[in-house]
Amino acid sequence: MGKKLPTTLLIVTLAWMILASGMIFLYAPQELTMGEVQRIFYIHAPSGWVAGTAYFIVFLSSVVYLWKRSPLADDLAHASAEVGFVFCSCLVVTGPLWAKPAWGIWWTWDARLTLTFVLWLLFASYLMLRSYISNPERAATLAAVVGIIGFVDVPVDYMAIRWWRTQHPQPVIAGGEGSGLDPRMFLTFMVCVGAFHCLFGYLLLQRFRLAAARRDLGALRRALAIRPSEE
Amino acid sequence: MLNVYLFLAFSALWVIFFIYAWSLSRRQRRLRKELEELRSSLEGGRGEWKSDVRTAEGNSQSTRKT
């Protein structure tokens, strides 16, 4: 893999983030009813999309780990859970900052908000589980089970605003008739989704490399500790 | 004028990302340090091993002489 891929990805991510920021403030039109505060949507919704992607990677990697017992799959699941937790935290923090001026309240326990909070708790419990169990194989197995069972929350969270009447706004993307965005808003939103996924990819790669290096170091230490008694 | 909620949302986003990036780089630095320590202890160990071998060789030669 070398150093080329992370450097290239970092440059692409930075360029994409700058473009996205420029489009949010200079290109996207101001929304008529909410005004400036609506621009939070361009960072709030992509954070949610990335959190969903991250948990999907946790789910897939957990399945592969339980099936093949591959340490790389476990490293990927762990890395994705950690980076996903960061994006899910952004989602949970930026939501109330939009809700207060739009609804007059910071938070309400409607289906979408509750399920998103559950997703944040799932990420947190996955990471806590891994850090509290000292046996690495046991921790990886139990975390994989949490990663698979917890994934149920992601599609239900996505569909919550379609299935139930919620305080959270109805979908503006793939929401059926009567929904939709101004073309400039839609383009800005998609650029933001791309930029956030690129940032996620970069952070995931860095975290995955760290996990793999730590695993190698642990194996080396164990091998060195074993050698004298073997001789 | 920039809306205060908009300002807070963007600030929170960047603060969260910077804290995470800082924590990642701190862990990478720690790992590099651990690798360096392991490498230096390995080199030190190899040195001890060589000196042990030299001592053993010297002992065997002196035994042969006697």
Image (cartoon, helix red, strand yellow):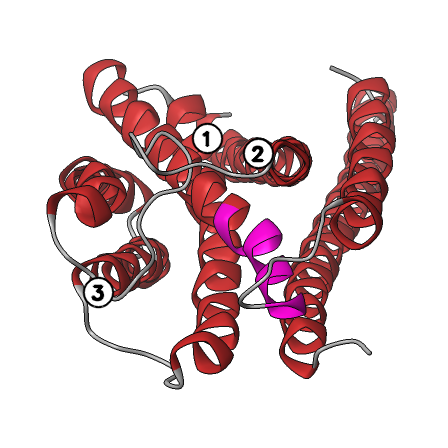
Please state which amino acid type lies under the numbered disc 2: Phe
How far is mark 3 from mark 1, CA to CA?
27 Å
Please report, as a chain letter, where disc 3 is located.
A
Q: Residue at x 40, y 85 (%)?
A: A104
Numbered mark located on residue A85 in the image: none
Number of numbered discs on residues: 3
Please, which chain is the residue tagged with disc 2 on? Answer: A
Q: Is residue B11 above or below residue A8?
A: below
Q: How far across and how far down the image is residue A66, in percent?
A: 20, 24
Q: Nearer the viewer, residue A22 or B19?
A: A22
Residue B24: within the magenta? no
First of labels 3, 1 by sequence position: 1
**The quarter of the displayed image where residue A35 is located:** bottom right
Closer to the camera: disc 3 or disc 1? Answer: 3
Residue A201 in view (yes/no) = no
Which image quadrant is residue B46 in? top right
Question: Magenta segment range?
Answer: A35-45
Residue A230, x across and y down, in percent: 45, 26
Q: Label 1 amino acid? A: Leu
Eyeballing the image, is B59 above or below B12?
above
Question: Which residue does the numbered mark 2 point to in the structure image?
Answer: A208
| Disc 1 to disc 2: CB gap under 8 Å | yes
Closest to the observer: A181 or A106?
A181
SS class, disc 2: helix
Secondary structure beneath label 3: helix
Chain to which the residue tagged by mark 1 belongs: A
Q: Which mark is residue A114?
A: 3
Q: Is residue A38 magenta?
A: yes
Q: Please say if the residues under marks 3 and 2 sit with CB atoms less than 8 Å apart.
A: no
| Dot 2 alpha-carbon crowd within 10 angstroms: few under 14, some 14 to 19, many 20 or more | many
Q: What mark, if any, has residue A76 been given in the picture?
A: 1
